[in-house]
Image: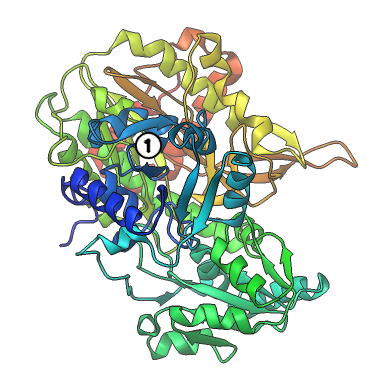
């Protein structure tokens, strides 16, 4: 049986200094003083295929966000707060320098690195219009010019670069889609027509996969079909993807109004379009803007027409997500019950990852939704830690074990984090764990008027940590797809979020705390937005928790909880117990009864 998660070196070798030297030689040949190497692919995906993992191949850094800027004598790797620990363990500090971002803007770094100015190259397929415009404004007066290159110089020095993926495409079951692809296309096409737009370019594969009710296997853990698409105001659609991905059944599923064309036909098709063409400056590649501008085609700036409809889950999608969480909850309870029966020191992180994968297979998982984060002790303080054979750590007495994982089921996607003590309780962890729990409960119980954004709610999850002088350096929550990407835009719970929350949207609720060199704490449930009771004339929203799994009570300072917080946790645990008990054997059912007992 093929494992879902492997534990080898994800960066692809250790000759990164030589690769850096080769890149610099190529830049000199092209009269470039520097080059920007993003994590993103042409679709701005967080998770990229092996063929697009340029940042990891060049630098060794494998985080899901960040970028590098290489000049003739400096190589900065820009990372946010999630990766401050991880980056130091992965890059060669003699050749690459971690740069805290967004605290340090790339424009400011470039001004210092190139005080006399120079030509800095970028691949226009790997950056958005918004990103490039922002950098150009920030570099005004610096004598530094951003130069779009025709061929990516990293690809030129990557001799064994993998081929682009050609994964199998399948139809997403109508039972869980809740709306036909034809109706979705007609609905979005009517919006284009009402806006006076002749067509829209879709560059996000999850938008395209949602719109066409298809799922793929091009990118591990994310059931998307790597593709671009042009939707016309008639509802007809040109899909730019390798034709080998679609068998006769899939072509019949797509229907006569969807034409499949090879990816290299996109540029010519854009040139031939009549405008106005909607392009999303936040998600569409800079190259698409340049092609249309060169052709003299009118561009209508606007959001991806599928991005908000996809975020608003319909009744069938919500039902599928609930079913997925029921299946996943059984797997998680079996894992936690099994874990409690093992003696401290007898397991490694990889052992537990493999056992959790087996429990999820028993529940019909298609894939995991991301590489499982299984961080014991100090590894738990690495926010997006990925265990490898080299880092695999025995789980010792007194460790906290942070388990962040999820599954892809045919009906939905899950993402859950639990933190459990192994053997002896670390009393230093009790206060921050309780603060994290109280923040999670506060967000779970929130009620708010329509129009509120995730930025308004973020402080609710941090308030109890802040009171102790603590915080965490990641967002509190991200959007989640329905049998799609576990990280789905554009909604989130973050100080930077300005997208209004709406009924049907699904978010994660995951405050945390990380003490470098000691332990990490994170608790995560998925929550669905739903209408709640309000006075006449006012629309109010709240959250319904989808995740079904006990929260470990051994690390809770019960005396610090309010009565309402106790009631919430007892009520949640009763819900978990009622939902899962009948599906468990006697041993696991007894464990669940104990794990969900009312607080005392």
Q: Secondary structure at mark 1?
A: strand
Q: Viewer-proximal residue, 476 or 429?
A: 476
Figure quadrant of residue 69: top left
Residue 595 in view in this figure: yes
Q: Viewer-proximal residue, 519 or 66?
A: 66
Mark 1 highlights which residue?
A: 76
Q: Viewer-proximal residue, 361 or 385?
A: 385
Q: Viewer-proximal residue, 226 or 409?
A: 226
Residue at 61%, 24% (x, y): give it: 460
Figure quadrant of residue 67: top left
Residue at 29%, 63% (x, y): give it: 156
Extreme residue in the left direction: 346
Expressed as whole percent of the image width and height from the top left, the position of residue 100 reads 44, 29
Expressed as whole percent of the image width and height from the top left, the position of residue 544 reads 59, 41
Which quarter shows the N terminus? bottom left
> On the picture, is 543 further left or further right than 145?
right
State how many labels appear.
1
> On the picture, is 296 further left or further right than 36?
right
Expressed as whole percent of the image width and height from the top left, the position of residue 39 reads 40, 50
Which quarter shows the C terminus? top left
Quick check: 14 above or below 4?
above
Expressed as whole percent of the image width and height from the top left, the position of residue 491 reads 61, 46
Extreme residue in the right direction: 537
> On the picture, is 323 further left or further right than 233?
left
Quick check: 96 above or below 282?
above
- Color scheme of the displayed model: rainbow
Residue at 30%, 49% (x, y): give it: 24
Quick check: 338 above or below 292?
above
Residue 364 in view in this figure: no
Residue at 69%, 39% (x, y): give it: 453
**Is the residue marked by circle 1 packed among few (<14), some (14-19), or many (20+) residues within 10 Å?**
many
């Amino acid at each position: 049986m093929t494992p879902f998660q492997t534990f080898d070196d994800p960066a692809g070798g250790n000759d990164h200094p030589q690769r850096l030297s080769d890149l610099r030689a190529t830049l000199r040949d092209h009269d470039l003083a520097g080059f920007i190497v993003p994590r993103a692919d042409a679709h701005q995906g967080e998770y990229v295929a092996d063929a697009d993992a340029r940042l990891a191949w060049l630098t060794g850094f494998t985080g899901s966000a960040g970028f590098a800027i290489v000049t003739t004598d400096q190589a900065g790797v820009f990372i946010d707060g999630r990766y401050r620990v991880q980056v130091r363990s992965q890059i060669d500090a003699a050749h690459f320098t971690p740069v805290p971002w967004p605290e340090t803007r790339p424009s400011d770094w470039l001004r210092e690195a190139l005080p006399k100015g120079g030509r800095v190259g970028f691949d226009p397929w790997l950056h958005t219009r918004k990103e490039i415009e922002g950098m150009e404004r920030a570099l005004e007066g610096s004598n530094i010019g951003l130069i779009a290159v025709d061929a990516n110089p990293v690809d030129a020095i990557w001799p064994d670069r993998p081929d682009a993926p050609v994964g199998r495409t399948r139809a997403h079951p109508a039972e869980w889609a809740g709306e036909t692809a034809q109706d979705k296309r007609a609905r979005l096409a009517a919006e284009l027509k009402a806006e006076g737009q002749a067509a829209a370019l879709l560059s996000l594969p999850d938008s395209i996969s949602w719109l066409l009710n298809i799922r793929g296997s091009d990118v591990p853990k994310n059931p998307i079909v790597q593709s671009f698409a042009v939707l016309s105001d008639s509802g007809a659609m040109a899909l730019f993807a390798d034709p080998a991905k679609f068998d006769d059944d899939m072509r019949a599923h797509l229907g006569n109004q969807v034409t499949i064309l090879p990816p290299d036909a996109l540029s010519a098709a854009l040139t031939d379009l009549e405008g106005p063409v909607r392009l999303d400056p936040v998600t569409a590649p800079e190259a698409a803007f340049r092609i249309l501008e060169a052709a003299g085609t009118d561009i209508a700036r606007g959001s991806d027409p599928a991005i908000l409809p996809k975020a608003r889950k319909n009744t069938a999608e919500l039902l599928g997500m609930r079913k997925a969480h029921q299946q996943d909850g059984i797997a998680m309870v079996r894992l936690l019950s099994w874990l409690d029966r093992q003696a401290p020191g007898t397991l490694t992180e990889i052992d537990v990852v493999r056992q959790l994968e087996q429990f999820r297979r028993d529940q019909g998982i298609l894939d995991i939704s991301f590489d499982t984060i299984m961080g014991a002790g100090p590894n738990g303080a690495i926010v997006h830690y990925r265990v490898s054979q080299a880092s695999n750590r025995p789980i010792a007495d007194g460790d906290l074990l942070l388990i962040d994982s999820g599954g892809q089921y045919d009906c939905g996607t899950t993402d859950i984090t639990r933190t459990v003590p192994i053997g002896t309780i670390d009393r230093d962890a009790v206060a921050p764990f309780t603060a994290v729990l109280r923040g999670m409960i506060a967000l779970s119980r929130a009620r708010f008027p329509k129009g509120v954004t995730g930025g308004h709610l973020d402080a609710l999850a941090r308030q109890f940590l802040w009171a102790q002088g603590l915080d965490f350096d990641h967002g509190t929550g991200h959007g989640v797809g329905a049998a799609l990407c576990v990280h789905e835009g554009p909604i989130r719970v973050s100080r930077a979020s300005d997208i209004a929350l709406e009924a049907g949207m699904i978010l994660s609720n995951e405050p945390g705390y990380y003490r470098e060199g000691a332990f990490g704490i994170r608790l995560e449930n998925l929550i669905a937005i739903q209408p709640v009771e309000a006075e006449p004339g006012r629309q109010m929203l709240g959250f319904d928790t989808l995740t079904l799994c006990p929260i470990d009570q051994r690390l809770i300072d019960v005396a610090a909880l309010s009565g309402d917080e106790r009631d919430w946790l007892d009520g949640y645990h009763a819900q978990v117990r009622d939902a899962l008990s009948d599906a468990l054997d006697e041993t696991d059912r007894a464990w669940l009864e104990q794990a969900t007992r009312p607080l005392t």
